[in-house]
Each structure stands twice: as C-alpha cells, then as structure tokens.
Amino acid sequence: MRCPYCKNTKDKVVDSRTAADGTSIRRRRECDACGRRYTTYEKVEEVPFFVIKKNGTRVPFDRDRIRNGVVKACEKRPVSAEQVDALLDDIEARINEMFDKEVASKFIGNMVMDSLQELDQVAYVRFASVYREFKDVNEFVHELRRIVERESDGKA
C-alpha cells in the first residue's frame, strides 16, 4: 500500500475490522516514513457476469431487467414486492452457484418461468407469452391446456 501523503510503500496495519456493511474490511494504517495514519478498505473483487443473448452477443447481467419482466407479468396480481424479491434472489443465487462467468438468456428465462409457474399461474402465462413470443391465440390456448392438465394430474 502506498501512503497517500508521502507515497512511501512501507506501512503497518494498526487496526483491522469488518466494515459496517459486512462486505469489506476496514484497515487503519500508519506510514513508517511520515507517521501519518490513513484508512483503506479491502473487498472481494466482483467478476463481471455476462448473459449470452439469443443472437450470441454478451451483455452484463442486470437483475433489474429480470425484475422488470417479472413485475409486468405480476401486474394486478396478488403478488407482493417481497415475493418478487425472493424470486429474484433465488434465481440469482442459483445462477451464481451453477455458472462462473456467463449464462444463456434462455436458461434465465426458463428459470423465471418455472418460478412464476409456482408463484402465480396467470403471471407465468403472461411472461411465457412474451418470452416464448406466442404468434397466435392457439399457442396461448395450448399453454393454458398444459397447465390445466398438470393441475388435473395433481402435478401443479
């Protein structure tokens, strides 16, 4: 570490503790040359995570993009903001567990649909109709029939 006052590279740590947010370590240092003290913070380096889109381009992972789609699908449904946040937390945690640097948007979309299907079937159909780009009413009806059949089989 370089002293911000005299630029000397020799110092000693006089105090070290977890920062208030819990995501970094606060270190109080004293320069061996000038004797002045200064504070540094140490935190885990966040590696950028990318999403591979349908056309093959890579874009940075953006939780808010997923949130926007889920919120639109859940509009005027009995789904609370806390439930949406929990759904997003779960999806993000599973993605981080399964992938290191990049994930296909198709995988994320399928995870969202699976989660929405458990949370609210109307929201699921809304999301699926946009995500799967239903071309006509027949595709919409086919998806609804699939849901009704699963319910009648006791799988929903």
Image (cartoon, rainbow, N blue to C red):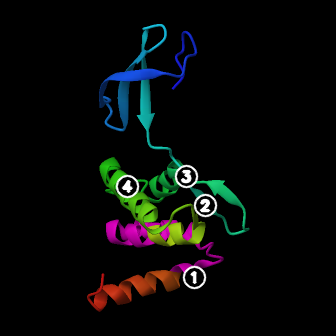
Give the left or right position of residue 97, taking residue 60 as reference. left
List the single residue furthest toward the left: 154
Residue beneath disc 1: 139
Q: Mark 3 belongs to which amino acid?
A: Arg
For mark 1, give the secondary structure: helix
Task: Determine crowd level at label 1: few under 14, some 14-19, many 20+ residues with C-alpha closer than 10 A.
Answer: some
Q: Say if mark 2 contacts mark 4, CB within 8 Å.
A: no
Q: Residue at x 44, y 86 (%)?
A: 145
**In this rendering, is residue 50 above or below 7?**
below
Measured Cα–Cα span from mark 2 to mark 3: 11 Å
Measured Cα–Cα span from mark 3 to mark 1: 25 Å
Horizontal and vertical percent for residue 27?
37, 25
Which badge, 1 or 2, is on the more N-terminal residue? 2
| 93 and 9: which is toward the camera | 9
Which badge, 3 or 4, is on the more N-terminal residue? 3
- Quadrant of the rendered structure where residue 7 is? top right
| 75 and 87: which is toward the camera | 87
Q: Mark 2 belongs to which amino acid?
A: Val
Residue beneath disc 4: 89
For mark 2, give the secondary structure: strand
Which badge, 2 or 3, is on the more N-terminal residue? 2
Measured Cα–Cα span from mark 4 to mark 1: 30 Å
Residue beneath disc 2: 51
Q: Residue at x 35, y 66 (%)?
A: 120
Q: Is residue 8 magenta?
A: no
For mark 4, give the secondary structure: helix
Horizontal and vertical percent for residue 10?
49, 21
Which badge, 4 or 1, is on the more N-terminal residue? 4
Horizontal and vertical percent for residue 128?
52, 71
Q: Is residue 123 magenta?
A: yes
